[in-house]
Image (cartoon, helix red, strand yellow):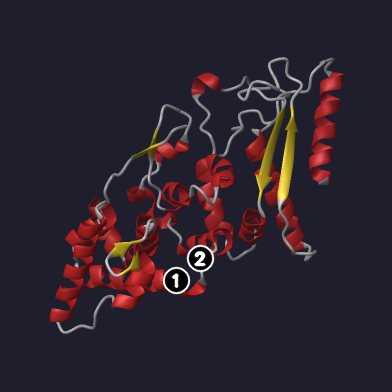
Amino acid sequence: DLAFLEYNRRVLDLAQKAGRTKMPEARSSAKTLLIETLLEIERRRWEEAQDRRPSSVTAYLLSNSGQSNPLDERNPPLDIYHLPLEITSFLFSLVSDAYRSEWNAITERAWQMVLPAKRKKKGTDEPGGDRPRRNFLYEDLFNLPDNVRKFVRRYLLRIPVRNQREDDPRRLHSLRDEASLVSWKLTELLLREVIGVDKERIEQIRDLGDRLAAYVSTENDRRFFTAFFSERNYDLFRNALIKANLAHVKRGNPPLITLDPYIQVFEEGNEVARPDWRLARDLVLIRMIEQLYNLGWLGKNIDVLPETVESTEE
């Protein structure tokens, strides 16, 4: 990438003029810099209508640090970062007009927080200045699709994480304050491009979210919403859905959900939960929350959103 090359040439020139024997520290961490660069490349490819066939990417980070040791996994002289075709295809779509605004809204909130005690002095000529070096969302892309549920909950459902890093903005996630960021559009793209979920199941998840959102809004069923959001036991979760379904039918309405769509979304067979049923529930929730926000129900019942906090190993 020419822009990337020119940037490095400029930094090298500044270092030489300043009489330095080493290049200044990179403006971003390796993973963040890789995603930033790829997004910029994809943006220009999209705008210039060039060849739009995505490809996988492998990046090699070489280190000549005196602390690197080929026998030490903590400080290897070579790190290899691989982004499969599914991720690069996902990134390519995200730079288009259809997704850019929603994507930018969540990525801007994922930058490492610059703590006051660690701010650099004004006037520094090192690249980046006070600019944070790490974007947590960018770096979590490298863990997909294995950690898809964590990714969905952290960034698309805005569930905060509890860890020891004071500079981690994910600690401040709040669905109560950030419900407007919940986007089915981004979720559907993730399911299609990265996870490879088939079109029929995606439609079943979306349609179920629409029906349940309409039910919650019409009946003002706060108890059901809380149970659907928070229940961790599958049998109790299933019972909550059955009760809501029966109550809806008794009022003279058609069923909220029928057997075949329910099985396709949540089960491997009759009453046998899918191993990823909690992920399926989170996906339905994303559609529900988006719809309830647009209907105005969520704004009037914001306290119904649990203040869930999850731990992270980072």
Would residue 210 be visible to someone looking at this image? Answer: no
Secondary element under disc 1, as helix, strand or loop, is helix
Identify which amino acid the numbered label 1 is placed on. Answer: Arg
Q: Residues within 10 Å of mark 2 (few under 14, many from 20)?
A: some
Classify residue 313 by image quadrant: top left
Tell which of 164 and 218 is nearer to you: 164
Where residue 305 sits in the image (x, y, percent)?
27, 52
Residue 200 shown left or right of residue 306 in the figure: right
Q: Residue at x 77, y 21 (%)?
A: 64
Q: Residue at x 39, y 56 (%)?
A: 276
Would residue 43 be visible to someone looking at this image? Answer: yes
Where residue 221 sits in the image (x, y, percent)?
19, 65
- What residue does disc 2 label? 197
On screen, residue 60 above or below 273: above
The reply to whether discs 1 and 2 touch (Cβ–Cβ < 8 Å) is yes
Tell which of 260 and 57 is nearer to you: 260
Q: Residue at x 85, y 15 (%)?
A: 19
Classify residue 71 by image quadrant: top right
Give the CA separation, mark 1 to mark 2.
7 Å
- What residue does disc 1 label? 201
Q: Residues within 10 Å of mark 1 (few under 14, many from 20)?
A: some
Q: Residue at x 79, y 18 (%)?
A: 22
